[in-house]
């Protein structure tokens, strides 16, 4: 079985830093992925972790602890265009998604 | 454009009718996935193919749903006897085989059953 949990909604201020958490339980694991999805559009890939630790990609970073079944996505220097849903996904042979965290960035 | 392509992008159909969606994956990718997404939810896994073989199918997928990938390239998803609860966005994605390989999504096909 598989269970992926992330907060439903978050709000942050332009220029700030926000951390979106994800916890998971899975019977197989080949990586933890983060996608961004704007309303009415398809998800786009942001970041992934296969090994424990922090992966940094510009304003976005993702962290993974496999022993704890935990990941987070860190967004720095928030911009208005970062308002979107952020999807945590666990890769096995397929890929399963959480329900998404809807982030609203306010001026 | 060499991304994942889906058509039609939008489909409105009457309850009880059959609909078919087509997906053309990124040409080098041997894995192809179908997902369904409703408002406020993450993509829900339906099925996936490796080349022409359908390797996994969600238990949530009723017998009214069928997917094919006859030559290991494009895929079709057919929904028979549509119901209002089938209204959703149907997303296709593709990837290379192997752990850590990112899956890339198409723009999705919106289905409205009236």
Image: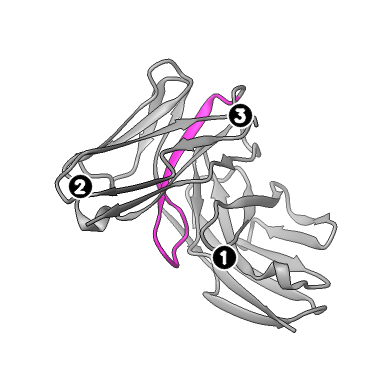
Which residue is label 2 attached to?
A: B82
Q: Does residue B81 sit above or below B3 in this rendering? A: below
The chain to which mark 2 is attached is B
Give me the residue at 61% from left, 79% from top. A10
Q: In which quarter of the image is residue A67?
A: bottom right
The location of residue A11, given as percent across then percent down, is 64, 82
In this orientation, which residue lies closer to the viewer: A88 or B23? Answer: B23
How far apart are the alpha carbons under marks 3 and 2?
32 Å
| Chain letter, disc 3 residue | B
In this view, the mark in front (2 or 1) = 2
User: Is B73 situated above or below B78?
Assistant: above
Q: Which of marks 3 and 2 is nearer the N terminus?
A: 2
Q: Which residue is drawn at 44% across and 63% down?
A: B41
Q: Is residue B39 magenta?
A: yes
Q: Which mark is residue B96?
A: 3
- Left of B44 or right of it: where is A92? right
For image coordinates 41% across by 39% down, the residue present is: B8
The region drawn magenta spans B29-45
Disc 1 sits on a residue from what chain? A
**Which residue is under mark 1?**
A23
- Residue lying furthest top: B71
> Residue B5: where, in percent of width, then height?
53, 35
Q: Please, is residue B4 above or below residue B10 in the view?
A: above
The residue carrying pointer 1 sits among few (fewer than 14), some (14 to 19) or many (20 or more) residues within 10 Å by Cα, namely some
Q: Do callouts 1 and 3 point to residues on the same chain?
A: no
Task: Please state the horizontal and vertical placement of residue A6, each as a whole percent of the image.
Answer: 55, 69
Which of A20/A82 is in front? A82
Q: In this view, does A6 lie to the left or right of B86?
A: right
């Amino acid at each position: 079985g598989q269970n992926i949990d992330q907060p439903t909604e978050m709000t942050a201020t332009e220029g700030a830093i926000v951390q979106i958490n994800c916890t998971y339980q899975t019977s197989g694991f080949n990586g933890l992925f983060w996608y961004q999805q704007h309303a009415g559009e398809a998800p786009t890939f942001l970041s992934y972790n296969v090994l424990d630790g922090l992966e940094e990609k510009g304003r976005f970073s993702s962290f993974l602890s496999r022993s704890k079944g935990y990941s987070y996505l860190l967004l720095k220097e928030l911009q208005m265009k970062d308002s979107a849903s952020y999807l945590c996904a666990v890769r096995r042979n397929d890929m399963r998604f959480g329900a998404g965290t809807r982030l609203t960035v306010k001026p | 454009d060499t991304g994942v392509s889906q058509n039609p992008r939008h489909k409105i159909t009457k309850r009880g009718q059959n609909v078919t969606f087509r997906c053309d994956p990124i040409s080098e990718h041997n894995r192809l996935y179908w997902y369904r997404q409703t408002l406020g939810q993450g993509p829900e896994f339906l099925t996936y193919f490796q080349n022409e073989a359908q390797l996994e199918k969600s238990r949530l997928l009723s017998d009214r749903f069928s997917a094919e990938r006859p030559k290991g390239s494009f895929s079709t998803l057919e929904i028979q006897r549509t119901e209002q609860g089938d209204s959703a966005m149907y997303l296709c994605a593709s990837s290379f085989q192997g752990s850590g390989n990112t899956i890339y999504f198409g723009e999705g096909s919106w289905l409205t059953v009236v």
